[in-house]
Image (cartoon, rainbow, N blue to C red):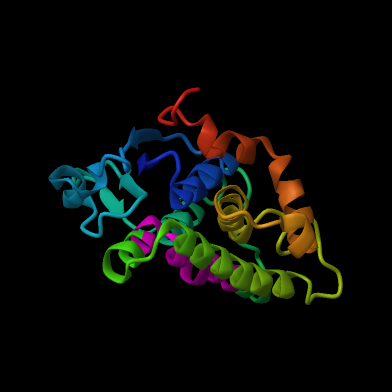
Amino acid sequence: MPQLTLYGYYKSSCTTRLRIALALKNIEHKTVYIDFFNKEHRGDAYTAINPNQSLPTLAADEGDGKGPVYITQSVAALEYLEEAFPDNGIRLLPSNAADRARVRSLVEIVVADLQPRQAAQTLEKLGNDLGANQDQKVKWAYDWCIKELRAYEKQVTATASPGKYSVGDTVTLADVCLVPGIQNAVERWGVDLEKDFPALAKIYDNLKALPEVQGAHWAKQPDAPKE
């Protein structure tokens, strides 16, 4: 079995995706905590394994003497977990090709359309290059959350018989990505999920009931600030 190391940060939504998936699939791994606040991700040591300086990185060592493979994008890491550990825990991609396509479409709404537009480096760029103040940054992030969560909600309600989760009654990669996306939208940007997205609110309630999701919340991570 590959030996896994997750390089992450407690508040990183992309890292949270990996934490949830690793827990749902019951995969043993160790974690290296990267101090994003103090810009450790931009230091030479981390840049050597992830030139994009993004979080997380999943290192997979097959034990063949070649050293670890560094998977530097969260969705690629999620797909790797499905392929390398097919019999661990639950399957996060459906067996049906059409349902897999639905899952992947929802994943892309979060990871390609939502998350990058309210990521720290985007907001930093808005301030540094365009002079946006904090209120303008918050409005920018809020507006994108509303737009993309609306698109997500329309897709999950388009089916005649929606299930407990994003695609049917089994947790998928779409849900793994949705959880931190909603956490950001609600906790950081003030989105009223119950009011604006009732279908997503129900899905999120079902997801929050899972111990694997509860344990992956940023506030419960060892590197999170303690009150």
Residue 23 position, x and y percent, is: 55, 39
Q: Residue furthest top?
A: 227
Residue 215 position, x and y percent, is: 58, 34
**Relative to 128, is 17 above or below?**
above
Nearer-the-camera pick, 16 or 128: 128
Question: In the figure, residue 201 lies in which quadrant?
Answer: bottom right
Where is the N terminus found, in terms of image quarters?
Answer: top left
Q: Residue at x 46, y 64 (%)?
A: 136
Q: Residue at x 78, y 71 (%)?
A: 157
Nearer-the-camera pick, 37 or 86: 37
Question: In the figure, residue 89 lies in which quadrant?
Answer: top right
Nearer-the-camera pick, 11 or 81: 11
Q: Which span is picked out in magenta?
A: 103-123
Q: Is residue 115 visible?
A: no
Q: Residue at x 48, y 31 (%)?
A: 221
Residue 149 colored magenta? Answer: no
Helix, strand or loop: magenta stretch: helix
Q: Is residue 91 left or right of residue 125?
A: right
Residue 199 position, x and y percent, is: 79, 62
